[in-house]
Image (cartoon, grey):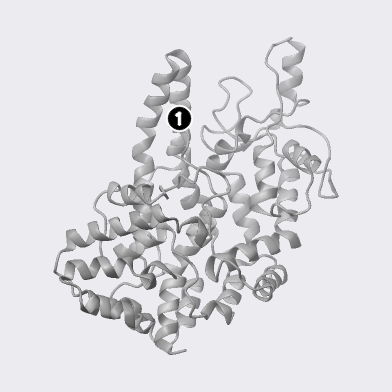
């Protein structure tokens, strides 16, 4: 395999595709280029100060929630959606600019990978203002740390607590429930198992990780009281509105047994102890290794590659940069076979990077992604977006990509030589068939559409 080919693989498989000039900047040492991004990633292109914090978003939706209780419910939902949508679009714009402009595209791909792993979705009006904050506040700062640190930050974040309903989960034997019982109030208090289940099934051990329904229930009891200030409008409230807080009054007392371990810790330390043990579990290592291999290698990575990643995770105590270094050192990851099919997200970013196009409005990115089937921060499930070729290669999906390619080419016109551009971004991986198609195009506009619709461009 030529050095040029490995350079293209580095930019395409580990990033969002090459910009003109990227292949020269990567040079003859693509692995070193990737390693530098792990060690010294570039900073944010967007101004973080312009984005609303999770605390501000929670305060806004709690205020709107209280108003909704007083008036028509449907009108309140519409009001909340209208209020939160601009915040949502700001984060869509910020993450898009970062992916298109950043000189550390591998690091950005890792941010997107972990954001999808811990997916929250803007399916409810209150989530519109929160989904982006999870990525910027809990995931991005920990991409180069230990998985246990990222896990702890994510599970305490208001976006996760809201999306998976834990912010109102109350132990049936908690102080609040017992006090209400003495007063003979009609409201029944109980735990919500959503967050506990998804932590075990999706975030750590995996669906076949060996946990039981009893583990889910007991773990849900452990994390009762993991909430944020402002949930209650009385003396039961704790902490500042919108900030994470452990509310002892909501917590189910007593020791709990999770995954064959007994946790006798008091207060918030009980849940933190469970999360640390889950992060260090060998099933978690295997689950995360499998997902990373499937994302960066192929839909069917070898058991040997998964095993090496899992071993690196366990031996380093979940140190993610060590795992990434192991990943880029695998022979299989440099296979020339472009078996992975770009998701709509990756595809649109690749087109924009190729053209050095920075969207002026968030609609210019959210619109195409919605049409292509991957609306930003809207996976519709805590399982996140699928990550195999068959999920994105249907006939209708391909037709929509061709339509997008044509529409972009129409806007660019004949200003760009598509054949020269293809050499700059795909190098020696450009097939002779595609090269001939581009050279025979009736116009630069048609050639550009053919380039964006070509197999080499759509796969990584």
Return the residue nearer the eye: 139 or 377: 377
Circle 1 packing at 10 Å, graded few (<14), some (14-19), many (20+), is: many
Q: Which residue is depicted at the point 54% across and 77% down?
A: 333
Residue that protrudes farthest toward the top in the picture: 184
Query: Disc 1 designates what residue?
Result: 61
Where disc 1 sits, the SS reads helix
Task: Give the percent coordinates (x, y) of residue 250.
Answer: 69, 29
In this view, the residue in front, 82 or 275, is: 82
Residue 417's spot in the image, x, y percent?
A: 19, 75
All told, the count of numbered labels is 1
- Left or right relative to 66: residue 205: right
Q: Is residue 351 above or below residue 21?
A: above
Quadrant housing the C terminus: bottom left
Depth check: give the residue in front, 394 or 416.
Answer: 394
Seen in the image, is 190 located left or right of residue 322?
Answer: right
Residue at the extreme front of the image, as rendered: 395
Provide residue 329's location: percent of width, then percent of height: 57, 80
Quarter of the figure with residue 410: bottom left
- Identify the residue at horizontal 26%, vertical 49% (top origin): 361
Determine if residue 62 is in view. yes
In this view, the residue in front, 152 or 427, is: 427
Instruction: Indicate whether 419 appears above or below 158.
Output: below
In this rendering, the answer to whether 92 lies above or below 284 is above
Is 414 left or right of 354, judged from the image as shown?
Answer: left
Residue 20 is situated, as x and y percent measured from the top left of the image, at 28, 75
Q: Left or right? Give the position of 320 relative to 20.
A: right
Q: Residue at x 59, y 55 (%)?
A: 150
| Res 45 seen here | no
């Amino acid at each position: 395999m030529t050095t040029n080919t490995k350079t293209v693989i580095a930019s395409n498989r580990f990033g969002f595709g090459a910009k003109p000039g990227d292949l020269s900047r990567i040079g003859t040492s693509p692995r070193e280029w990737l390693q530098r991004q792990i060690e010294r990633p570039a900073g944010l292109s967007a101004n973080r100060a312009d984005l609303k914090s999770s605390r501000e978003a929670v305060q806004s939706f709690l205020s709107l929630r209280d108003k909704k209780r007083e008036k028509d419910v449907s009108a309140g939902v519409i009001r909340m959606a209208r209020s939160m949508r601009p915040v949502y679009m700001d984060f869509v714009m910020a993450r898009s600019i970062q992916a298109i402009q950043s000189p550390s595209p591998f690091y950005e791909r890792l941010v997107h990978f972990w954001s999808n792993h811990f997916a929250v979705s803007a399916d409810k009006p209150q989530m519109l203002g929160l989904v982006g904050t999870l990525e910027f506040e809990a995931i991005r700062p920990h991409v180069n740390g230990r998985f246990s640190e990222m896990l702890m930050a994510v599970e305490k974040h208001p976006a996760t607590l809201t999306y998976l309903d834990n912010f109102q989960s109350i132990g049936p034997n908690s102080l609040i429930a017992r006090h209400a019982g003495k007063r003979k109030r009609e409201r029944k208090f109980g735990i919500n198992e959503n967050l506990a289940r998804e932590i075990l099934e999706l975030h750590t051990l995996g669906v076949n990780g060996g946990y039981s329904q009893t583990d889910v229930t007991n773990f849900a009891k452990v994390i009762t009281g993991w909430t944020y200030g402002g949930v209650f409008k009385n003396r039961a409230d704790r902490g500042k509105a919108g900030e994470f807080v452990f509310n002892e009054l909501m917590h189910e007392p007593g020791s709990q047994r999770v995954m064959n371990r007994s946790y006798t810790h008091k207060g918030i330390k009980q849940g933190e102890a469970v999360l640390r043990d889950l992060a260090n579990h060998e099933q978690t290592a295997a689950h995360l290794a499998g997902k990373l291999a499937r994302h960066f290698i192929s839909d069917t990575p070898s058991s040997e590659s998964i095993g090496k990643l899992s071993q690196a995770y366990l031996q380093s105590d979940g140190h993610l940069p060590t795992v990434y270094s192991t990943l880029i050192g695998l022979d299989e990851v440099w296979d020339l076979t472009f078996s992975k099919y770009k998701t709509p997200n990756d595809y649109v970013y690749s087109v924009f990077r190729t053209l050095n196009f920075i969207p002026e409005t968030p609609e210019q990115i959210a619109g195409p992604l919605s049409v292509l089937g991957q609306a930003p921060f809207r996976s519709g499930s805590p399982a996140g977006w699928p990550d195999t070729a068959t999920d994105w290669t249907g006939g209708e999906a391909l037709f929509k990509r061709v339509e997008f390619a044509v529409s972009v080419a129409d806007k660019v016109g004949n200003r760009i030589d598509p054949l020269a551009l293809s050499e700059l971004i795909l190098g020696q991986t450009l097939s002779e068939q595609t090269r001939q198609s581009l050279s025979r195009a009736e116009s630069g506009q048609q050639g550009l559409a053919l380039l964006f619709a070509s197999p080499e461009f759509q796969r990584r």
